[in-house]
Image (cartoon, rainbow, N blue to C red):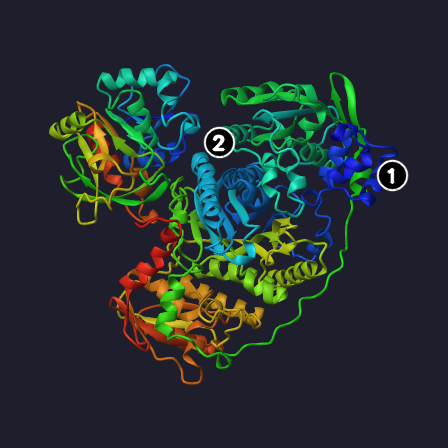
Amino acid sequence: MKAGVVVFPDSNCDRDVMVALRAASGGEPVVLWHKESSVPPLDLIVLPGGFSYGDYLRPGAMAAHSPIMRAVKERATAGTPVLAICNGFQVACEAGLLPGALLRNASLKYVCRDVHLRVEQSQTVFTARYAQGQVVRIPVGHHDGNYVADAATLDRLEGEGRVAFRYVTPEGEPTAGANPNGSARNIAGVFNETRTVLGLMPHPERLADIRLGGTDGRAMFESLVEALA
Amino acid sequence: MTRFNMPMAQVARELGLSADEYRVLVDAIGREPTMTELGVASAMWSEHCSYKSSRVWLRQFPTQAPWVIQGPGENAGVIAIGDGLAAVFKMESHNHPSYIEPYQGAATGVGGILRDVFTMGARPIANLNALHFGAPDHPKSRHLVAGVVAGIGGYGNCIGVPTVGGLTVFDGGYDDNILVNAMTVGLARADRIFTSAAAGIGNPVVYVGAKTGRDGIHGATMASAAFDDQAAAKRPTVQVGDPFTEKLLLEACLELMATDAIISIQDMGAAGLTSSSVEMASKGNVGIELELDRVPMRETGMNAYEIMLSESQERMLMVLRPGAEDRARAIFDKWDLDFAVIGRITGTGRLVLRVAGETVADLPLAPLADAAPVYRRPWVATPPRAILAAEDVVAPVGDGEALVRLMGGAHLASRRWVWEQYDHMVMADTVQRPGGDAAVVRIHGTGRALALTADVTPRYCLADPYVGGAQAVAEAWRNLTAVGAQPLAITDCMNFGNPERPEVMGQFAGCVEGMAAACEALRFPVVSGNVSLYNETNGVSIPPTPTVGGVGLIDDLDAMAIIAFKRAGEPVVLIGATRGHVGATLWLGAICARDDGAPPALDLAVELRHGDFVRGLIRGRRVSACHDLSDGGLLVGIAEMALAGDLGVALAPAPEDLPSHGWWFAEDQSRYLVTATPGEAKAIVAEAENQGIPACVVGTVGGDALTGLDGEPISLKSLRNAHEGWFPALMGEND
C-alpha cells in the first residue's frame, strides 16, 4: 500500500499516523505538503489530526482551501480512499468531502480521553478487520467534535449505512453519558456515498501499540493494508 | 506628565530601579542614559532577569554529575540519557500574568518554556505544570482555574506537545497571587546542543518568527513587583500567545538546526529583544549592533524603546555563519515566518541601537553586567515548630470517614477535570498518562522512556523551609523511583514572596539549603531553574513554594511500575517506617482544621536506601504495582491504588502501639507500597528486613471495597464518586 499523509501548517498527528501506517504495512508513507497542487499516484490519502492554521477561523476552514486539497478532492472523487482523522475530519467536512459539520463540544471544553465506539459498518476498506457491532476503545482529543447535520441528512446517512462509528458505553449502548462532545445520534465517524472517504473524530493511531495501553486502533490500518496492498 | 518629559531619575524609579541602582547605572555608563538605554538597563536589572536577590543563595545547588551536559545558565538544562541522546528541560513561572489574565498568562507561560527548550536544539516531547490556586471557595478561584487550564491546554494542544503531568493545589495562601509553573522536556542529540553565546565579528544577527507589536512591554518589570488592588490595570503588560506561529517556528528552527548555519540562538522571552541581544553578546564577550527599523513590526510608529521592550511572543534571535543567510531564509519562507537580518556582531563590547541611521542607545555591556546589582538581603530563620505526635491529637472522626473526606476533598480529589482538557497523548509515546506517581514518555522509536514529575509540599516549606525544601526534592525523586526510573536531575521554580522582607528571605534561604542537601544526597543535581519573587499582594506573601521538576530514565519499559492493584489475593507491602507523624499533615489540616506541628523528618540516607531497594524490585519485575506515599499517608495511598485498579482491599489491623490515625494518616517520609504474589511478598519482606529496611504486609487485594477499618466497609463506588465528583462540582458541573 502506498499512503500519503497531508501536512498542513500545524498538523501535529502526522508523525503518529505515519508510525501506525508503517507498523501495519511495512511501507513508508509520503508527505504531501499543503502548498503542493498535485499528488503522486497513491492507494490512500490521510488527512491527519492536530490543527491547521491554528484553526483560529473555524476548524478546517482555512485548510480546506489550501492548494493540496483541490488535488485531494479530485482523487477522492476518482475513488482513492481518504482517511480523515480529527482535524482531518473537520477539513473534509469543510471541503465538502463529507456531509455535516463539527461544532464546539457541548461541554465547551477540550476533551482528551479514551472513548468506546461501536463499529456500525464493517463492510469497508477501513473497517473490514472489525466485526459488525464490535465495541472498541480509542481515544479522542478535540475541542470541536460535536457532529451536526440536518435531520434529513442524518436519516440518509443511517439509511445508507454511512455511519461508521458511534460513541457508546463499554456495553455498547449509545447513551448521552458515552457521548464526549454532544454529537448528533452519538455519531463518531461517517462515510461518503461510496464509503471511500472516512471521517472520524477519535484517533485510531493513538491506541495501535500495546505499550500505549491498547491496540484497538490497529485493525483500521490493517484493514486498509489488506484491502489496498 | 509622561515618561518622556520626566527627569530620568524619576523615570528610573517608575521602571523599577532604586535610586541607588540608578546612580550605579549612571556611573557605569559615565552619563545619564537615554530613554531607550534606561529601558534596556531597567529590564536587565529587574529581579526577573538579574536574579539579584537570589543569586548568592542559588550557588549552593549541586549542578554537576557525570551525566550533566549543561547546567544552569543556558535556556534549559541538558543531561545525557544514553544512545547519544540528551534530555533538555526547564521549568518557569508565569504567576503574575496568569493572575491578571489567566488564559493568556498561562498560555504564554507554556509557549515561553517550549521555546527555551527548542532553542537548545531539542524537540519538545512533554509538558508538565504545577498550579497553585487560592481557596476553592474564594470568589476568583473558579475563574482562575478555568482560565489557566484552558490556556495551558489551548497552547500545548495546538502546538502538539502532550501535557502529561503536574500538580494542582488549592490553598488560601494563594488567594491573591496564584502560581502557574510550566515545565517542558525535550529530546536532542547530545552532540547537537545549541547555546546562546554570540561569536564571530561581523556575523549577521537574524530575527525570525512572529512580528513585534506593543504587547507585553514591561512584562519583566511587572513580574518583579508586588501586587496591589490595582493589579488588573496591568493587563496590557500580559502578552498574547499564538501557538500556531510557535509550531511553525519550532519546525523551522529544528529544520535549520539540522544544518550548520547557526552559531548561537536565543529566544525572546522576558524583556524581549533587550535580554536576548544583551545575553548573546555578553556571553560571547562581543558587541552587537542592531538596526531597529529592520525588525519586522506588526504596528506602525513603534519607537526604539517599545521595540526593545516588547514581549511579543514566538520570536527568536540567531547569529548565523556568514553566507548562511539565504539557506536559512529559504527555510523560514517555507514555514511562512518572518526572517530579517537586523544587525551584526562587533568587537566593541557595546550594545548599539540605531533607528534610521541615528544611534538611540550605546551601552558598554561588560560594565553594565559587572555593575548589575547583587543583594545579600537580610534574612531571619523561620522559628522551629514543635513535633506533634499522633498521641497529641484526638481524631475528630473515624478513619473511614476521614479517608472519604480526604479523597473527596480539595487536596486529593481527582484532577481528571484538569488533565482531560490537555492533550496528553499526542506524539503517541505517552506510556503512563496523568494520575500515577510520574508520567512516563517513551523515547520515540525505542523501548526506553523518561519519567517526569513536578512536585512540592508548600505546607511543609512554611512549617520548616529546610525540611520542606529537602522534601520537595525527595518527593520528586520518590515519584520517579516509584515507576521504576533512575532519577537523574531536576529543574526548579522558586516561588516566594517579597525578598525585601527578612522572614521571606529566611524561607528562601532555608528552602535552598534543604534542596541542596537533598540534591547532594540523592545525586540529583539542579540543571536549570527559575526564581519568582514578589509573589505578594497587599503585603501578604504566598507560602514558600519551591516547585521541583524531576526527570528520570527507564531503561527497559518492560520493567516499569504503575499504581493500579493488579490481582486479587496479592499482599500489599509497606516499605519504610511509620512513626505516626501527624504535624503539618493533610489529615491534620483537612480533618482537624489545624496546621501546626513540624513537618515529618526526612533522613536522606534512608530515602536513598529505601528508594534504591524499591527500584531494584521493580527492575527485577518482582512487583505488580508500586506507589509512593505522600499527602494523606498510608490509607490514602492504598485507596489510590484500589481506585486505579478497580480492586478493593482487606486491610490488616493497625498496630497497637500507635493511635489508628497515626498509622493510617501520618506522613512519615521515604515510604512506598508494593504488591506482589504472596510468595514474592514474603521474600520481599524478608529481604528488606535483612537490609534493615522496615517492611510489613498492610492488606490483601480483593473485593470491591476497603474493609477492615472500624465501621462499614467503604465501597470503591462510593469512594470513586467522592473522588471524581469534587472537581466538577467546584466548577459548577454536575456530570
Relative to B55, is B644 on the left or the right? left
Which residue is at the front of the view, B198 or A132? A132
| Chain for numbered disc 2 | B
Tell me, for residue A30, which label it has, or none.
none
Please rate how many residues cluster around mark 2, counting C-alpha atoms within 10 Å: few if below 14, some from 14 to 19, many from 20.
Answer: many
**In which chain is the residue bearing label 1?**
B
Residue drawn at x 23%, y 33% as measured from the top left: A189
| Circle 2 residue | B247
Q: Is residue B508 left or right of residue A81?
A: right
Question: Where, quadrant-wise, is the N terminus of chain B in this rendering?
Answer: top right
User: Callout 1 environment at 10 Å: few (<14), some (14 to 19), or many (20+)?
Assistant: some
**What element does badge 2 sit on?**
helix
Which badge, 1 or 2, is on the more N-terminal residue? 1
B335 in relation to B420, above or below = above
Three-letter amino acid code at the position of disc 1: Asp
In what element is the residue under mark 1? helix
Residue placed at 57% from the left, 63% from the top? Answer: B522
Residue position for label 1: B27
